[in-house]
Amino acid sequence: MPVRAILTDIEGTTSAVSFVFDVLFPYAREHLPAFVRRHAAEAEVATQLEAVRAESGEADADVERIVEILLGWIAEDRKATPLKALQGMVWEQGYRAGELKGHVYPDAVATMRRWQHEGYQLYVYSSGSIQAQRLIFGCSEAGDLSPLFSGYFDTTSGSKREAASYARIAEAIGRPPAEILFLSDVLQELDAARAAGMRTCGLAREGGELDGHPTVSSFTVIEPAAC
Ligand SMILES: CSCCC(=O)C(=O)COP(=O)(O)O
Ligand SMILES: [Mg+2]
């Protein structure tokens, strides 16, 4: 079955890990407390605060306690859906104010443009919320890259380390998993995608191998038809 669609991870794959850890996460750490306090009563935020209470098992947590929990989750890089949703809202302010510009490797930009031209459908799957994904590509250093993508998937489709998430995504894309090539820098994600029947290619930007998967250091050398 030929590859028809390409599903890509963000952090460490299209974009530098250092942009997420040294720019995005510190920005969220600095601005999230005030954002949560200011918007706690608004429905969109209140829903996420309730989800933090549920996930932490602290049903009575007040706003200050929730802020503490969220800062702890940022520190441990927990891929908790309500944290990711709130981070996306905070980053939106940063992108709109011109304080943030999404990092996307030039080789990823050029190659994804070529793939789109060649007829491949491109999708994103990241632990960052769909809002955060739209922002990193829509407000990137290379301009608005959002026209490249046919769809976005986040942790509401499930954990990136579970095969069932990839089966769900293939269903949503409307293609058999074997027609989808998944790109990631994390072995457990590649293993899960392959267990669901997707093709895989590992990105090791600093060199090295992702055991059992074809591995490259740049998008430029990925040939979807050969994967
Ligand atoms: C959408 S940019 C922010 C990325 C993020 O919050 C994150 O946790 C990285 O997750 P990924 O699945 O892209 O490794
Ligand atoms: Mg990654």
Image: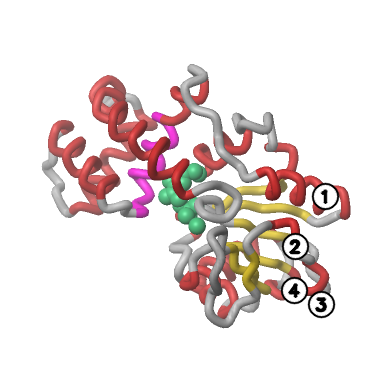
Residue, disc 1: 114
Residue, disc 2: 221
Q: Residues within 10 Å of mark 2 (few under 14, many from 20)?
A: few
Is 193 magenta? The answer is: no
- Residue type, numbered disc 2: Val
> Up-down: is 176 above or below 116?
below
Which numbered tag is attached to residue 227?
4
Residue, disc 3: 1
Magenta highlight range: 79-90
Helix, strand or loop status at disc 4:
loop
Distance from mark 3 CB to nearest ligand 2 atom below 8 Å: no
Question: In x, y percent, where is residue 216?
Answer: 65, 66
Residue in the image at 64% along x and 78% along y: 197
Residue toward you, 47 or 95: 95
Task: Tell which tag, 1 or 3, sits nearer the viewer.
Answer: 1
- Residue type, numbered disc 3: Met
Q: CA distance from mark 1 to mark 2?
A: 12 Å
Q: Residues within 10 Å of mark 3 (few under 14, many from 20)?
A: few
Helix, strand or loop status at disc 2:
helix
What is the quadrant of the C terminus in the image?
bottom right
| Tags 1 and 3 touching, CB below 8 Å | no
Residue toward you, 20 or 120: 20
Q: CA distance from mark 3 to mark 2?
A: 21 Å
Task: Tell which tag, 2 or 4, sits nearer the viewer.
Answer: 2
Q: Residues within 10 Å of mark 1 (few under 14, many from 20)?
A: some
Question: In x, y percent, where is residue 69?
Answer: 19, 44
Indicate the quadrant where residue 4 lies: bottom right
Residue in the image at 26% along x and 42% along y: 50
